[in-house]
Amino acid sequence: MDYSLIFAALFQLAQLLLVVLAAPLLTGWVNQCQAWLQNRSGAGVLQPYRVLRKLFHKDAVIAHNASWLFRVTPYIVFGCMWLAAAIIPIIAVDLPFSQAADVIALVGVFALARMFIALAAMDIGTSFGSLGARREMLVSFLAEPALLMVLFTASMISHSTQLPRIVEALAHHQFVLYPSLAFAALAFVIVLLAENARIPVDNPSTHLELTMIHEAMILEYSARHLALIEWASSLKLFAYMSIGIALFLPQGIAEMGHWAGLPLAIVILLLKLMLAGAGLAVLETVTAKMRIFRAPEFLGTAFLLAVLGLLIHFLLGA
Amino acid sequence: MPIKHPNLKLSRMTDAIPAWAGEIAPDDLHEICRQVRDGGGRLVALWGSDARPRGFMLHVVLVNETGMVCLNVLLSADQPAYPDISQIFPAASRMQRAAYDLLGLRAQDAPDQRKWLRHAAWASDSFPLRKDFDAAANRTQEADAYPFVQVEGQGVHEIPVGPVHAGIIEPGHFRFSVIGERVLRLEERLGYTHKGIEKRFESMSLQQGAKLAGRVSGDSTVAYAWAYAMAAESIAGVTPPSRALWLRALLLERERVANHLGDLGYLGNDVALAFGFAQFWMLKEQVLRNNATLFGHRYLMDKIVPGGVTVSLDAGGKRVIEEECAMLEREVGILRGIYEEHAGVQDRFIGTGRVEPKLAAQLGLCGMAGRASAQAWDARVQFATAPYDKLDVRMATYRNGDVAARVIVRFDELFESLRLQREILTNLIHEEDAPALLEKLPANGFGIGMVEGWRGEVMVAIHTDAEGKLGRVHPHDPSWQNWPLLEHAIIDNIVPDFPLINKSFNLSYSGQDL
């Protein structure tokens, strides 16, 4: 009897649970690092869990004119982000769902979630909802092409748009430095900041409603709906960091069939995530938020860098 | 203040500041106001009082470099009306509207006759500051309809913000008319924190009044308490002991330091530089804690009372303040360097929310924000009352009028306040105060006190009644003058820059809502 399929299914299940449970921890870690960098003691890495528990215990308040769209959006967004985070090969490359982890499909999953959250923001008809949705669309329509270019650069090297094949190609062949990927990595960091509503494009911790992008869209959400959206934001950050790790730092991931390497792979992944989180915290601490109309320039830079990476790949073949 | 008008007889008020008062008829108001404006003067405050059976009184305080004059305009008891002066002093408009809401004094031909402070708290035909007003009988269920100015055109839409905000701040409503992100017009609506402070003052004792004055706007409690005490002392004709005056100045400068530190932190926070926010607020917290240990209150409430102060400072306390000043000078110096060299921060600050000096002069921008728009006016310099006459305050001015300028003025004033605190400490002699606190005021007196608070000039006027109790007390916050300028500062800026511009002014809601 072939046990490997059962094992694979078990590990896929494990990754599903791991990402959904660990994602708030990553957010908590980033916040805690920021607190340390600002000479504050901070609320601790477990704070996002406390917030989620608090929100799930509250009664939801929903606008009278909210339609079904407003109610289902948190579930759709949460589902999309969970799916995205779960199919990215982060601990092993050969999991059953990995086949679905096509980079173009991933971008599509993010776009689906964004479309629903923007529609839900406009659904209740407050000025802040539409304001946030408008700004979100401005940022994301500039970030998306840059992200695609980054992913294309990586798939050029591995001749596949499937994340497991890309990771496989980059991680398990002999170690090569790809100059094209260096440019792509820079572009990816910019896209990560913009897509996850981080400084300098957006400020996730602001209370100033007029400056908000992502927060303005979810101002009307409360209780379990808000909890799901917050959780989805954590998952999204987790997914983006996983993509970044898979593309640019895949070393240490467990090889196909080498299940014994898994515990080590998990430890290595945690270390990489901690490092990435701390790096994000440093970036956010030293930068100020830019004027919203600087965002196109900023994301234009990301696109330019990604294109440069692609060109370098063609010119140098690396 | 030399005003030449055949129908105006000025008498010098016994004031620490050069102030005169005179009674005029409504018909002469225009002429005199115009004369003062043409001479470079401006409007400080406008309020009314109920002097029936003689009639109603309108009080207009004007100021120029040489002094302050209070015009008392006698209005008839049954048709209290006076000529509109908002065309001469635009800042008068909201004060006139408030004077109508509270007393029913009508500014004839004023272009804006909408309610200002009333909202729907009392009926439109009753006036709370009239002596015959019955608060209990005047509960109204009237709906609060307020006609905002509409901006029309293709693609113009409105963003209503507040009075409930996403953060915990004071309530105010802001109506933006925008195209995309660009602001065409902003209209403010305030008055949500109207508490009836002026009504509450009526027939309070002098000491109760001091407590209330210190709570008009919590962040300026020292300035209000001092202005109140100054007004009372001017009615009683007493001068507090010099040690008390030195201590008052020390407290006022500490209030300025604490508020500027807080604002500089907030300005960092508004451009998402949470680092600056945390650092400045740690420093502010240190100042507040020292306040608590040295004077018994973090924000220094109730430390200044008519006749003197209720605090003292020993050699140990002096040392604490000296160490604190040295620490602040060092730390704020470093933080200033970080702010000024941070490209992202400067990109947000420079050119944002600009108020040109010309506009500032026309509309009467005052205080700290005024000095950032080249309105070189500081009551500590112009009317250097004791002990500032011995201190030689260096005024901080800048003419760019943008957020960056208001930040620089704050930094400069902060360092100057640290210098002043040290100088005050060297002048603070060790001697026990004779307890000479004022107990009671003479009957039918009138006095004005003015103090340069951290936000600008805070004025308190006291009228005593026939028994020497507080008849009418009018506290005036510089925010009255500066709120309308905020509407101009935001024009042609983008919506997400509003919180930053707003914070760079940091005006008081409570102080103007009363």
Image (cartoon, grey):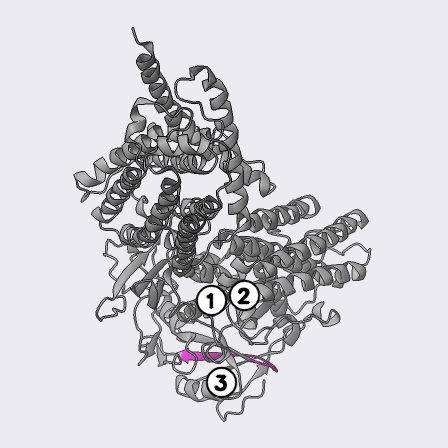
- Where residue B454 appears, as percent x and y from the top left, is 58, 62
- Where residue A157 appears, as percent x and y from the top left, is 40, 40
Secondary structure category for the residue under label 3: helix
Q: Main secondary structure of the magenta part?
A: strand
A156 relative to A116 in the view: left or right = right
Whether residue B190 is visible: no
State yes or no: residue A137 in magenta: no
Mark 1 is surrounded, within 10 Å at the Cα level, by few (under 14), some (14 to 19) or many (20 or more) other residues, namely many
Residue at point 56%, 63% (across, down) = B407
Q: Which residues are magenta?
A: B64-74
Q: Nearer the viewer, mark 3 or mark 1?
A: 1
- Mark 3: which amino acid? Arg
Residues under numbered marks 2 and 1 in contact, where contact means CB atoms less than 8 Å apart: yes
Q: Looking at the picture, do discs 2 and 1 lie on one chain?
A: yes
| Mark 3 to mark 2 CA distance (whole Å) | 29 Å
Q: Nearer the viewer, mark 3 or mark 2?
A: 2
Q: Earlier in the sequence, mark 3 or mark 2?
A: 3
Quarter of the image for the C terminus of chain A: give it.
top left
Residues under numbered marks 3 and 2 in contact, where contact means CB atoms less than 8 Å apart: no
Query: Which residue position holds label 3?
Result: B37
| Mark 3 to mark 1 CA distance (whole Å) | 29 Å
- Where residue B394 appears, as percent x and y from the top left, is 68, 71
Query: Which residue position holds label 1?
Result: B352
Residue at point 59%, 42% (across, down) = A37
Disc marking residue B404: 2
Whether residue B112 is visible: yes
- Circle 2 marks a residue in which chain? B
- Where residue B189 appears, as percent x and y from the top left, is 35, 62
B226 relative to A155 in the view: left or right = right
State yes or no: residue B71 in magenta: yes
B448 relative to B513 in the view: left or right = right
